[in-house]
Amino acid sequence: MRGEVKNAFALVRPPGHHAMTVAHGNRGFCNINNEAILVEYLRKKSTASAGSQSWTLMSITGTGHRRFFYNDPDVLFISFHQDGRTLYPGSGFMNELGGPKALGRTINIPLPPGTPDEGILYVLDSLVMPILEDFKPELILNSAGQDNHYTDPLANMRFSAQGYAKLNEKLAPDMAVLEGGYAIQSALPYVNTGIILAMAGLDYSCVSEPDFKPGMFVQAARDRQILEGVVATQLENWKNRDRLVEVEVAKHGDFYRRKKQIFYDTDMIQEFQEETVRMCPHCQGYITIDSHAHRSVNDIRIFGISVPIYACNSCQAEAAEEYRKRLNSPEYEYVYLQDKKADEYRTYNMRTKKETVY
């Protein structure tokens, strides 16, 4: 952000893209959502005037990113991923457009299994780049998951190192962050090299997997038609985003609520969650989350309140009062207050009756 380097690639482990606002355990090999924290930190520390910042989180895979910013109109989330009907975690569909005040700021691009470079780059050129040109973000982050590589053991896509490099050359992200991807020997060395060369503006034409041959994967005609439909639908949603917001906001009163179930595949935990958004006429509104996790040994229930960075004073005060009221609710093991505006974070342990302030 200070301009000391042009761009960067963060080679980090463990990944974070499946981690959500609540973490009862490990989910999709993720515990902490690195990029969501990065975005919030930069927004807090940036010298740009409050409310004027626009950010883009471009994801190859990123269910957790979507949940973090689902109600935030200042963050545009775009995700390429294999169709959720065919792969874990079974989400990321086109009708998941964002919360009432952020409709159209979540762009899910479900891809048919077997989609090669041609299909992914077609969607990039026809959908992603026009939206970015219109949104004009201050910062572009590439959540560089590599599950879509043709040798990945957990997915069924046909993306190559050359395709990844070309994507990053076109996208020109300010930062790429290594996320998923589990073909440790046959994919990651080549894909990461291609990404780094492309971001550095260097020739990546020599980067190739040992078994890759140009033309070995061809886009099926039927799948091309599916992708054309995805592009048309999401371009229309983006074009009409303000009208969609106006219509959706009119449906709700003071609060918007939604319930969801989340499965932690690596720890075998089932979470039941109710999210409530204060429909404030002056700001995004604060969010509360009532989360109950079912484990094999013991269950845990928590209540969390989150105040966005650009919250109004009224929402900030209401959220603080919600936190105080829940301290007398014995059904919760923990109660949390996450006040991003004040940079204040509180945790109350119901068993010990002790509060920790960060």
Image (cartoon, rainbow, N blue to C red):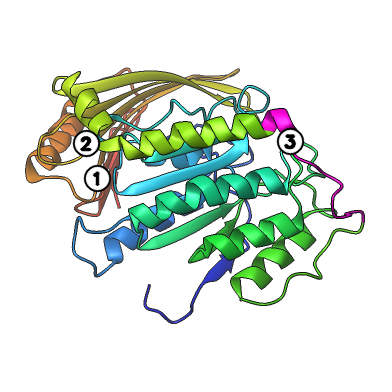
**SS for dot 1:** loop
Residue 6 at x, y percent in the picture:
49, 77
Q: Write down the region rendered in magenta.
A: 211-223
Residue type at mark 2: give it. Answer: Tyr
Q: Which residue is drawn at 53% across and 32% down?
A: 230
Residue 308: mark = 1
Disc on the earlier residue, 1 or 3: 3
Query: Along the line of sight, which residue is nearer the eye, 181 or 132?
Result: 132
Q: Is residue 220 magenta?
A: yes
Task: Kindly identify the amino acid type of the residue bearing the numbered disc 1.
Answer: Pro
Q: Nearer the viewer, mark 3 or mark 2?
A: 3
User: Pointer 2: residues within 10 angstroms few (<14), some, or many (20+)?
Assistant: many
Is 36 placed left or right of 308 in the picture? right
Q: Which of 237 and 67 is in front in this view?
A: 237
Q: State the residue position of label 3.
A: 155
Q: What is the count of numbered marks?
A: 3
Please tell me which of labels 3 and 2 falls first in the chain: 3
Residue 209 visible in rendering? yes
Residue designated by label 2: 286
Q: Quadrant of the N terminus?
A: bottom left
C-alpha distance separating marks 3 and 2: 36 Å
Graded by Cα atoms within 10 Å as few (under 14), some (14 to 19) or many (20 or more), the crowding at tag 3 reads many
